[in-house]
Image: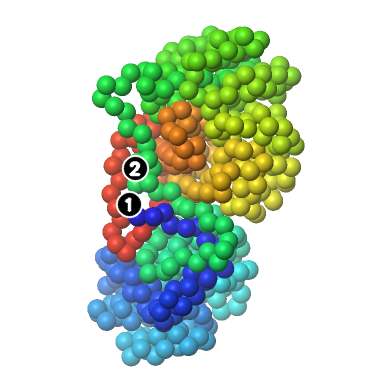
Amino acid sequence: MAALSPVLRADEAAAADVATIVRGVPSRALMQRAGAAAAAEIARRHGARLPHGVLLLAGGGNNGGDAWVVARALAAVGVHCRVHEAVAARTDDARAERELALPLVECGAPGDGAGVVVDGLLGTGASGRPRGAVAEAIAHAARLRAGGAPVVALDVPSGVDATTGEADGALTADLTLTFGAMKRGLLVARAHAGRIALLDIGLVESLDGESEPPRLVDARWVHHRLPRIAADAHKGTRRKLVIVGGDRGMAGAAVLAARAAAASGVGMVRCLVAPDSLPVVQGAAPEALGGPWPATDAEVDAQLGDWADAVLIGPGLGRGDAAGALLERVLARWRGPVVLDADALNHFAGRADALGALLRGRPALLTPHVAEFGRLAELEPRDVLASRFDVGLELARRTEATVLLKGVPTVLAAPDGRRLVTASGTPVLAAAGSGDLLSGIAGTLVAQMDDVLHAAACAAWAHGRAAELAGDGAVRGITLRDVHRSLARVWRERPTPPVYPVLAELPAVP
C-alpha cells in the first residue's frame, strides 16, 4: 500500500522541491509535471465546461508558471484559453513557460465569462492579505464563480497561507490541485480549498534531520488496519469496554458513547454511572450492562478487574469532588488500556505531569478539544490552534499517552514522536455529544488494537466519515443520531485507489 502523504509547512514543501532538484530533476521539469497533471485533472473533472473556454489568472512567481503550463496544455488540444497576467512573470521558469504558451493562447483583461477559472496567482511561498492587481483578480474570480464558473486553484488558493491556513482576502476555490505533498494550510482553510486533490509530481521527501512530519490518514489506510472480526467470534473475543461517566443530568453522554462503541464492533459494554443516571442509561442503551460508580477499591476491582479490555473515562463525568475521586481511584487501580475524554481531562487542568504519573506503563489515549487541551497543557486556546500540528507532541511525552487533538483537522501525536492527521468530517460534528460518539469508537478500537495511535486515528477518521455520509453535503437537519447510524456504512465501505496522478483526495466541506 502507498505511503501516507506528509502534511508539510510551506518551508518544508520548498525543501522537498530543492531536494528533488538536487536529485537531478530540473525545477522547470517539476513545473511542467505540475501543470500537465493539473491540466489533465481539469479536463477530466470539468470537460463539459471546456468548450466555454478557460480563464487563467497568472501571478509573477512559479505558481503563475504552473498556470502558463496548464494554458499551453489545454490550448494544444483545442481549448480556448485566455490568460490574465495580474503580475508579469519574474522567474526564469515562469518566463520560459510563458513564451511557449503565448502563440497558443489569448492574453488580456479577464473578461466577463469563462467555462472554468484557474487560479495561478499566489503559491505556497505567499503570506498575508493579497493586494493590488492580485486582489482585483481574486475579486473577479469570485464574480465569475457566483455566475456558475468553477474555480480551480493550483497548489493553494491564492491568499491562503500554506502553513497556517490564514485566509484573509483569499480566493475561494471549488477544487484545489495541490502538488507533491499535502499542505498544512489547506487542511485548516477547507472552506477556501473546496475539494482537494493531491497530485504526484515525483517529489522526494526532505526532512533535514527534523522530526518526522505528520501523515495524512486516508480510507485505504484505515480499512487496512481495522482488525477483522472472525467468523467464529463471540462477545468476549470482540472485547469488552467499561465506560465511566454519566453524572446526574449528563447520562446522555454515556449513552452516546455506549451506542457508538456498540456500532463499532465491541462485544460488550458496561456503563458505570451516577445512581440517578443508571435507569436512564439502561433504558436508552439496553445493549449495555450498567452499574453505579464504584465507591471503593474493591468495587473498582469487581467492576473492571479481569473483565475489561479497555476503560473509557469522561463522558458526562462531571467536575465535582466525587467524580474527581472516582477518576483517580480508577486510574490507580486499573492498569490496563484507558481513554480519557471531556471532564476526565478537565480534572487534571494544569496537572499534566500528575496525569502522566498515573498513566505511566499502560496504553493510554487522551481526546481533548482545543479548550480542554489548553487547560491541561496550560496554554491559551489561540496558542493551541496556532500550533495544532506540533503542540500535541510535548503533551504526549509529558503524559506518556497518545493525544488526539480534535478540530479541523484532527491531529494525533504519540509519545514516540509519530504524528497522524485526519481530515474527514463536516460541521455536523460541531454539536454537543459529538465527542462522546468519538470516545465510544476510540474505546472500542483501543480495546481491539495493539497500537493506540493507529486505533485513535482509525476512530477519528471513521467518526468524520460517518458525518460525511450522514449529511451527504448538508449540515442543517442532520443530527448525531444520523451520524451514529452511518457508522455501519463506514465499516462496510471498501475504498478504491484514486486515479493516478491523484495520490489522495478530500471532499469539499459543506
In the rendering, at what x and y percent does residue 75 appear?
Answer: 30, 80
Is residue 272 depicted above or below 36 in this figure?
above
State the CA–CA distance, disc 2 to disc 1.
Answer: 9 Å
Task: Look at label 1 and name its amino acid.
Answer: Met
Residue where numbered disc 1 is placed: 1
Q: Residue at x 34, y 47 (%)?
A: 220
In the rendering, at what x and y percent does residue 189 appear?
Answer: 53, 56
Q: Residue at x 37, y 37 (%)?
A: 226
Q: Is residue 236 visible?
A: yes
In the rendering, at what x and y percent does residue 435 appear?
Answer: 54, 33
Q: Residue at x 27, y 72 (%)?
A: 51
- Nearer to the camera, 296 or 148: 296
Examine the image and state in which quarter residue 343 appears.
Answer: top right
Dot 1: what SS? loop
How many numbered dots are placed on residues in this image?
A: 2
- Nearer to the camera, 351 or 273: 351
* In the displayed structure image, the side of residue 299 where residue 469 appears, left or right: left
Dot 2: what SS? helix
Examine the image and state in which quarter residue 462 appears.
Answer: top left
Residue extending furthest toward the front: 361
Residue where numbered disc 2 is placed: 224
- Nearer to the camera, 227 or 386: 227
